[in-house]
């Protein structure tokens, strides 16, 4: 199942005010799609709309913005209803709304854990559930769900984020099977570190602890997403780094060993950081 014609297609993009969502909106608009940017950040949406209009001047598609909290199912239903009523269909939903939080489990609050699950996972579920009726009526539609390489790995100090991204992965696989034969496709995206405000919010210590190496630009991810949708790819993994590629391979081949290797690496990193600060 693929989406090959973007001209005139209606794309709803959550997290559209920033980062990967914003870049994906640009890539889709350049190809003639109508884009509905949805985000909790109302000011950011207005800026994004202006910037998108400037960056893709001459593009035919409409740009709509809708302020929405993806954890609120009533608001998400309203978003999909507005998109369909205003533009006639919902052809593509890209779920980029998300947050990142890291830290040792001992001090990781239940509030932070709940937020990760609510925004990263329940937000994805709310979008899928609310867009499906229109897609079923159309007999066609496409979802792009943002997971992360953390949705395929067990990364120490990212237990909550990993849990939310594994949830997106499991949900995608089950839904893909459930939607078999309906004309509705799903690409799940698993990027390594991307240069967006989400990553830049980390403190220097957190960046070192998590060994953050920014590897991708939002524009690269957006262009890979568009290509994957065109090909109807189920899995878009973007890990242009030998360490992460090796970890992904090891997790598939021998998860027990991979967990031990990642555990040893974090212990060493913690010991190095403790030595350096003493
Ligand atoms: N940046 C990375 O390294 C990276 C790597 C892998 C996966 N991802 C995933 O990609 C997606 C996009 O992240 P990004 O890096 O572009 O981050 P970003 O911070 O640039 O964008 C995320 C957007 O989501 C919005 N948002 C947050 N909570 C929301 C809510 N409750 N309702 C609606 N909107 C909300 C924010 O306002 C923001 O505009 C996320 O799901 C993230 O987990 C990011």
Image (tube, grey):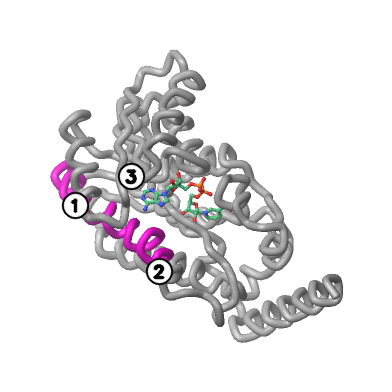
Instruction: Give the residue at x 48% y 18%.
Output: 54
Is the CB atom of the residue marked by disc 2 within 8 angstroms of ligand 1's nearest atom?
Answer: no
Find residue 135 and name its label: none
Vertical comparison of 133 with 66: above or below: below
Q: CA distance from mark 1 to mark 3?
A: 17 Å
Q: CA distance from mark 2 to mark 1?
A: 22 Å
Q: Earlier in the sequence, mark 2 or mark 1?
A: 1
Find residue 74 and name its label: 1
Q: Among all residues in the image, which is located at the extreme top?
A: 58
Disc 2 + disc 1, Cβ < 8 Å: no
Instruction: Give the residue at x 52% y 59%.
Output: 100
Vertical comparison of 106 with 13: above or below: below
Q: Which residue range is magenta in the image?
A: 115-139
Find residue 167 and name its label: 2
Does the magenta-highlighted stretch encompass residue 42? no
Q: Nearer the viewer, mark 1 or mark 3?
A: 1
Image side of residue 114 versus residue 220, left or right = left
Vertical comparison of 178 with 96: above or below: below
Q: Nearer the viewer, residue 264 or 65?
A: 65
Secondary structure that dominates the magenta span: helix
Residue 232 position, x and y percent, is 41, 47
Residue 67 position, x and y percent, is 31, 40
Instruction: Give the residue at x 22% y 55%.
Output: 73
Residue beneath disc 3:
93
């Amino acid at each position: 199942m693929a989406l090959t014609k973007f001209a005139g297609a209606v794309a709803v993009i959550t997290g559209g005010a920033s980062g990967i969502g914003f870049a994906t909106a640009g890539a889709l608009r350049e190809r003639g799609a109508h884009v509905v940017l949805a985000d909790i950040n109302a000011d950011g949406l207005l800026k994004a709309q202006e910037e998108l209009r400037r960056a893709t001047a001459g593009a035919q598609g409409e740009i709509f913005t809708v302020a929405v909290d993806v954890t609120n199912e009533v608001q998400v239903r309203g978003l999909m209803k507005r998109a369909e009523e205003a533009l006639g269909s919902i052809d593509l939903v890209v779920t980029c709304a998300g947050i990142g939080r890291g830290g040792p489990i001992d001090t990781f609050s239940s509030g932070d854990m709940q937020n990760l699950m609510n925004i990263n996972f329940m937000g994805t579920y709310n979008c899928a559930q609310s867009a499906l009726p229109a897609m079923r009526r159309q007999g066609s539609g496409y979802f792009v769900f943002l997971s992360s390489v953390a949705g395929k790995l067990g990364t120490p100090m990212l237990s909550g984020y990993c849990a939310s991204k594994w949830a997106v992965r499991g949900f995608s696989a089950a839904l893909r099977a459930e939607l078999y034969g309906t004309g509705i496709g799903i690409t799940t995206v698993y990027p390594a570190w991307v240069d967006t405000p989400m990553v830049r919010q980390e403190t220097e210590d957190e960046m070192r602890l998590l060994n953050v190496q920014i590897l991708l630009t939002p524009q690269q991810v957006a262009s890979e997403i568009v290509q994957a949708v065109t090909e109807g790819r189920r899995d878009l993994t973007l890990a242009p780094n030998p360490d992460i590629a090796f970890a992904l391979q090891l997790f598939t081949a021998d998860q027990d060993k991979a967990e031990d290797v990642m555990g040893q690496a974090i212990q060493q990193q913690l010991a190095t950081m403790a030595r350096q600060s003493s």
